[in-house]
Amino acid sequence: MGETIRSLKTELYNQLLNDALKQGQLDTLQPMIESLSPSELADLLESLPTKPRNLLWSLIEAQSDGEVLSHLNDEARASLIEITDDEELIEATQEMELDDLADIIRDFPDQVTRGVLAVMDREDRERLTQVLSYEEHSAGGLMNPEVLTVRRSVSLNVVSRYLRMRESLPKVMDHLYVIDRDGLYLGKLAISDLLTQPPKTRVLDLMNTDDPAIMATTADTEVAAMFEHLDLISAPVVDENNRLVGYITIDDIVDVIREEAERSVKSMGGLDETDDMFAPILSTSSRRALFLGLNLVTALIAAICIDLFSETIDQIVALAVLMPIVASMGGIAGTQTLTLTIRGMALGQVVPSNTRPLMSKEIAVGLLNGLLWAVVTAMIAAVWFKDGWLSLVVGVAIFLNMVAGAAAGVIVPIVLKRFDIDPALAGGMVLTTVTDVVGFVSILGLGTVLLLQ
């Protein structure tokens, strides 16, 4: 339902923008722009071709530019940064939180980065530098270094007075973090306890020391899994010395989950999650060319296998008719297992200790489904071609290929992972090669042995 509403809104805003362009009445767009959140504006910008996108970008207030940029994919962000004045980019960063600023400043030209750092105070500059010292897709790269800390020896009354003295508080704050005089992380104090417990109670008596802090070098996908398993809204981040360096909030994790979902979907087609839907034609075609080239290699392997049995095909044309069925059934069976395995690996559910049971289970499924559909297909072939030996060949070939596909669906992603190759990117292509080769060799090999004697 949410995706449908989002799609309808994007369609409506696209139509409004196109109408305003045709009529030359750009002032009518301002109420629409002001009604949209930075995230919605980013979605709308990504859905527009280059010319209307640049026009809409020019109408957005400079103060909002930074927030909008932080929600865009990398390529769309880079294209808009390129057409924006340096002064406007510097102004756009002034009201941003440091963790959001860290996400986009990596894409700024050097002179803009220097300008941004020049207008920041020393403390914020040091915090931003600290975030940038970590990998982008790590807990340190995600964290907000502007963390509120308290000492364990003080009372809740003192903490309350400390908070009231501040000009503002973080948008998402369910805990305060407890540190010692050296900045080492000790635990966290729930805001609910601060509000409900007696004012004279010490932080020491209420702080939670059970939930672990997150190492700054932890991968963002692992952080997302921790938030899911522990039902976290926020979590502290520490360095290798257990020094508190920042905290991560649930809104950052939602972004990680969305990016990971987009990456998984796009990688199946050999695309990068940073790809812009309306990127220049030449750059898009050049990126896709490599994946298409690799696919050509795998297709040639399958074609060579077919060529080995060209004489059989010449004499028994029916085999050529039935070959796509054998390859397709094995491919679908393998894809089902591959998808399950890749998802399990992403969630940390597929580990060396359970690989063998998973393999056994999937092969058993392949055996049962292979037997079922081998019988069904053999019966269809017998009625179609009125040849019992031909129906036997097709049935056995489908059985073998579906079992091979099920086994490959587990083996392929695990092997690719060991070689540091993304299974989501290359798994489908390798699996298709396996099921094509096994399927073609099975039906043509059996056909040669049983039908040409």
Image (spheres, grey):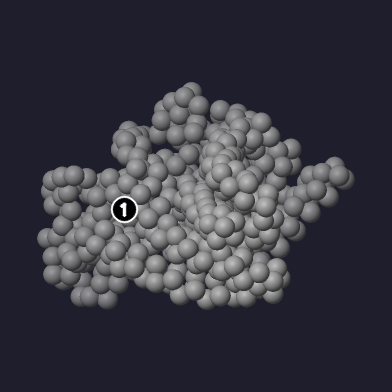
What residue sits 45% from the left and 34% below the top?
106
Count of labels in the image: 1
What residue sits 28% from the left and 45% below the top?
217
Give 412 or 239, whichever is nearer the viewer: 412
> Is 149 above or below relative to 372?
above
Q: Amino acid at mark 1?
A: Tyr
Task: Determine crowd level at label 1: few under 14, some 14-19, many 20+ residues with C-alpha closer than 10 A.
Answer: many
Q: Is residue 419 left or right of residue 101?
A: left
- Quadrant assignment for the N terminus: bottom right
Give 92 or 446, whichever is nearer the viewer: 446
Q: Is residue 417 left or right of residue 50?
A: left
What residue sits 18% from the left and 44% below the top?
240
Residue 437 image point, x, y percent: 52, 50
> Is 153 above or below relative to 57?
below
Tell which residue pokes out farthest to the right in this image. Answer: 23
Residue 308 image point, x, y percent: 56, 44
> Is 113 above or below relative to 303?
above
Give 133 or 167, whichever is nearer the viewer: 133
Element under label 1?
strand
Tell which residue pokes out farthest to the front in this image. Answer: 453
Residue 388 image point, x, y percent: 62, 71
Residue 365 image point, x, y percent: 43, 72
Residue 224 visible to an observer of this rendering: no
What residue sits 58% from the left and 65% below the top?
394
Residue 130 visible to an observer of this rendering: yes
- Quadrant assignment for the C terminus: bottom right
Q: Residue at label 1?
A: 247
Give 264 or 178, whichever is nearer the viewer: 264
Q: Is residue 333 left or right of residue 355?
A: right
